[in-house]
Amino acid sequence: MKKSLSIILSASIAFSMFSSIAFGANIAKSSADFTDLQNLDAASKIKFDALISAGIFDGVGDSTFGLKDKMNRAQFAKAAALIFGLPVDPSLQMSSFSDVLADDPANGYALPYIEALKKANLTDGFAANLYYPAGEVTKEQLAAFLIRGLNKEAEAKAIQGVSDNSVSDWAKGYAALAIQLKLMEDAVDGTFGGTSAATRELLVTSSYEAKQQYVPVSGDNKNEEEAVGSLPGEGQLLAVDMPSYALTANTQAQVKGILQEKTSSGWQLGASIKLTNTSSSTVRIPDYELRLKASDGTVYTLKASSDKPVSIAPQSKVELSYMTEVDKNTDFQLTNLLWVDVDDEVYPKQETILADAPIDSIVWHGASASIQDPSLMGAWGAAFTIPGETSALQYTASNVTKQFTGQAPTYNIQLRVKNTENYATTVPDFTLSGKAEGRSFIGKRIEQSAPTLNPGEQKYINYAIAAEPDAQLSAFYVLSTHSFLKQGMNAPIQFYTGRLGVNLPSPVQSGAGLPQYEMGKPIAIDALSKTVNPQMEVALQDLDWFENDGQSYKTAVAKIKFTNKSDNTIPVPQVGAEIVSPNGTSYDGTGIASTVKDVLPGIGAVGTYTFIVPKSEEANQYTLRLMEQQGQQVQQGQAAGQQAEQAQTQPTYKMPIAQVNVTMKTLNQIGKVYSFYPYELTMDNFNITNYAAKNGVTNSYGYSYKLEMGLDIKTTDAVLADPSNPKLLFQLEGPDGKLLGSKTYSLGGENRLMSGNQSVMFDNAGDTLESPVSTKVYEVVSTPYGDARRLLATLKD
């Protein structure tokens, strides 16, 4: 008989199916329905509510969850099938295992679930043709299942296993890694207790923790799904919706958010709830009072927004907002939201509590709010859904940039959103806030109108968070937006509630995991970007240091080739660029103006970008990021005048559409051949002669010099380049390095420097004869801060 659970796990199937569970489904049950779950701490309550409301776990009785009960293998099969979202055929009557029978009064219900696990290759049973449904699941078997589900079996085999004798030899590595990943922990006696039976409590908490750490493995659609410029995904962030409560036979209520924010005169309390009409006809919104209860027993009655609807359409939902102000300076804790029916027709009036929702774990404290539960704070790249929203949209933090408006920073955060349903969906009204030490800053969506996504479609939405000059954001929170119209007022009050957040990546993570880029190879552009035509190939051809004579900075010059692979002329893409040093310092690039505006079919165009960098910067390895502008997208149907007005008033924000790790390139010189993209210069020979001319008036002599060269100049690529960039600078110097004269020549246009025997005259270079003299040949690029140059050759007399 096998000692292990013998789960043959395909991680690409298992945990990808985890995401298909409808955690946001309106299931009435929660931990509040079970007497043995009333003393859970806030973090554990979140985990239990998530799996109970998803229908994965139920109680062993109407009001008992069975926290310390053991789970047998039949029960485990049902839970695993639901956790992984496996297709279950309830009509099955025959099993692959001889000991699993449909008419078994104790475990027959599990037959379809056991077969679902076997079909998905999650188990091959306990022994040959046996599943042993009544057997207990041990702690070490559970550890092995979770580690394999996280695709970390190789790590479990490589790690030093636990040393205690409570764990079977085959499971020591799994146990050690499960402890290290904080999926499970040792028992109170200091041992792992591997052969002891796993409790229902452990199965809930360990499965939830594993879900937070899961990183999806690559699949068939990796290239389509991957966001260029974003960091590796960090699993899913799960914030379960609150349970629903029946107010009437046809009306269900659900808490969306609770606000308790300190004001100068006391407290502002707010609540947002959803009411659902489950019937096939329009129903009136029930008459009730909505009250917030504090831990000291004090009850605060909320007022409904004056624009509150009076009815709910069939099979529809409405969102209602309530607020009140409390003149109280001392702190207090809200614990419950009460729906109370008040009968004023009798004396004394009679009050009936229609529903009582525990809300202590979701109270939002406004600008001072801080999410303490680590399970609700995701790593950068974690996927999440918006709590309280019924849309089937999934979001992933994709990119973050920082730019300054005046002296204050603005953080630009880009979310990738995907429609996972088979119908079109519009992005709901929510925003992000940036979290700094002791404070937060409300952001705004850059897109003027809410994007709509077709089934399976992906788009980006962007948020700008303006912070104070001394603020350093560490995370962003996802905030639902609520509107409350006070009686007699024209403009509504906006308030926000949050449930989950995502930690920002450190600056040095910007190029994390990117392979080293090879010059000239195509750069992958984000497939969701509209800035670069899909038939336009982009490649970095050169990146090198240029000097700025007499300045305390240097210039990095990047030359990017845009190749038109289509049959039609395409405009040169308007992309920005920046380079990021290994310590996270970013340097904005300036695109050099060019007369080349279009790229002809089959050839390329050169875009030149310059980056001003302090001379003290010693790094030679950088992350090059290509950027697109957000904030001036033309809205469909918008008039030209409106577009111009919008462009003048709406700020622009930059977001990366590609990034590569690059090493600064050194000058490519082979013998007398010098390569500087897109040109190659061959100097077969040269000679420097001097001439003396006597001034008839002063009888003094002036000396001139002539540089004669045999040149071969050609382009190395089929590209169009601006005639004025780059240029060649010939600089004549005396023996002490003194500048005697200089001449600059373009390499394009009518007056360009051409192949053949060429002469460069340095007239009246001095009144004394200098010898020996030399000529330095520079490649020159014009920048907004003056010319930057790179030494190609020194020609000595």
Image (cartoon, helix red, strand yellow):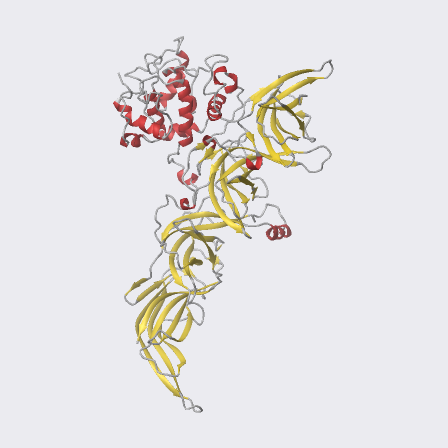
Q: Is residue 778 left or right of residue 30?
A: left
Expressed as whole percent of the image width and height from the top left, the position of residue 365 reads: 57, 33
Expressed as whole percent of the image width and height from the top left, the position of residue 418 reads: 49, 36
Of the 4 image quadrants, the one containing the N terminus is: top left
User: Is residue 13 visible in the rendered structure shown here?
Assistant: yes
Q: Quick one: 481 or 728, which is closer to the camera? A: 481
Q: Which residue is rendered at x = 46% and y = 15% of the image?
A: 65
Number of marks present in the image shown: 0
Spot the residue most to the front. Answer: 330
Q: Quick one: 100 or 767, which is closer to the camera? A: 767
Expressed as whole percent of the image width and height from the top left, the position of residue 5 reads: 31, 20
Q: Quick one: 594 or 146, which is closer to the camera? A: 146
| For residue 577, above or below residue 336 | below
Q: Which residue is rendered at x = 53% and y = 30% of the image?
A: 387
Expressed as whole percent of the image width and height from the top left, the position of residue 180 reads: 34, 30
| For residue 585, above or below residue 63 | below
| For residue 211, above or below residue 616 | above
Quadrant of res 225: top left
Q: Quick one: 539 or 37, which is closer to the camera? A: 37
